[in-house]
Amino acid sequence: LKKFLWSQFFWSPDRPTEDVLAEYASYYLCPEVAGDAVRLFHLLEESHPRSNWRVRNLAPADEAWALAEAIDARLPTWARTSWRWRLLYVRAAIDRVLKSNRHVTAEARSALQPLCDEIVRLYHAQNTFIRPAPLPTPKDTANLALDRPVRASSTHPECAGSERMLTNGILAQ
């Protein structure tokens, strides 16, 4: 999608982004789902900023998943099985799993593994070193501070007389 966008912007820089996205969806998916697909592209873009498995904004995940499911049901077989669609669909599925399993659980790992395996297959990367980020380790859900900002001050015992060091904004692990 990104390559398609950039090539279109170089070809016709004044063309609205929405038109370019709709053309992509019409050609690579099918014209009947173009409007919904453009909405899905925007939702996935909203949840894109991430660091490995920590996603900054999973608010659009439920809507993106519902839209992906609805689009998938309306696609012809050739489009439903295409790598372009599968990458979008898998991405929506990953965000749904991450949102529904706020704390990384064994259930989340078992749901994410086949999605990561599909990405590897889609990229034909089975025999390469390229892999999705390692799946997150399940966290101790008994930790009441888990994923909450921590405010703590401490003085290192080997640094007698030193100033106290204050740490803010670190998420408990």
Image (tube, grey):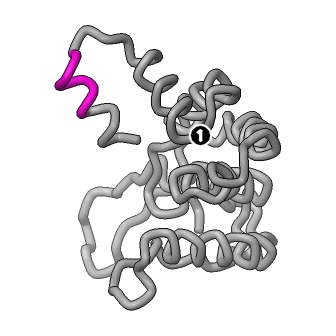
**Would you call the spot at circle 1 few (<14 residues within 10 Å), some (14-19), or many (20 or more)?**
many
Give the total of numbered labels.
1
Q: Which residue is mark 1?
A: 29
Q: Of all residues shown, which one is farthest toward the left? A: 10
Residue 10 counted in the magenta span: yes
Is residue 162 left or right of 91 when viewed as pictured? left
Q: Main secondary structure of the magenta part?
A: helix
Looking at the picture, does residue 134 appear above or below residue 33?
below
SS category of the residue bearing label 1: loop
Q: Nearer the viewer, residue 167 or 53?
A: 53
Q: Which residues are drawn in magenta?
A: 7-12
Q: Quadrant of the N terminus?
A: top left
Q: Who is closer to the viewer here, 48 or 11?
A: 11
Q: Residue at x 24, y 23 (%)?
A: 9
Report whether residue 146 is seen: yes
**Residue that appears at 35% across and 78% down:** 130
Find out whether residue 157 is within the magenta segment. no
**Tag 1: amino acid:** Leu
Left or right: 11, with 51 as reference point:
left
Instruction: Return the x and y of residue 11 as percentages of the image width and height.
Output: 19, 23
Position of residue 149 relative to residue 117, above or below, is: above
Residue found 33% across the figure and 37% down from its top: 4
Residue 47 point in image, percent of width and height: 55, 40
The answer to whether residue 148 shows anywhere in this view is no
User: Closest to the observer: 11 or 58?
Assistant: 11
Quarter the C terminus occupies? bottom right
Rendering coords of residue 126 (x, y %): 45, 86
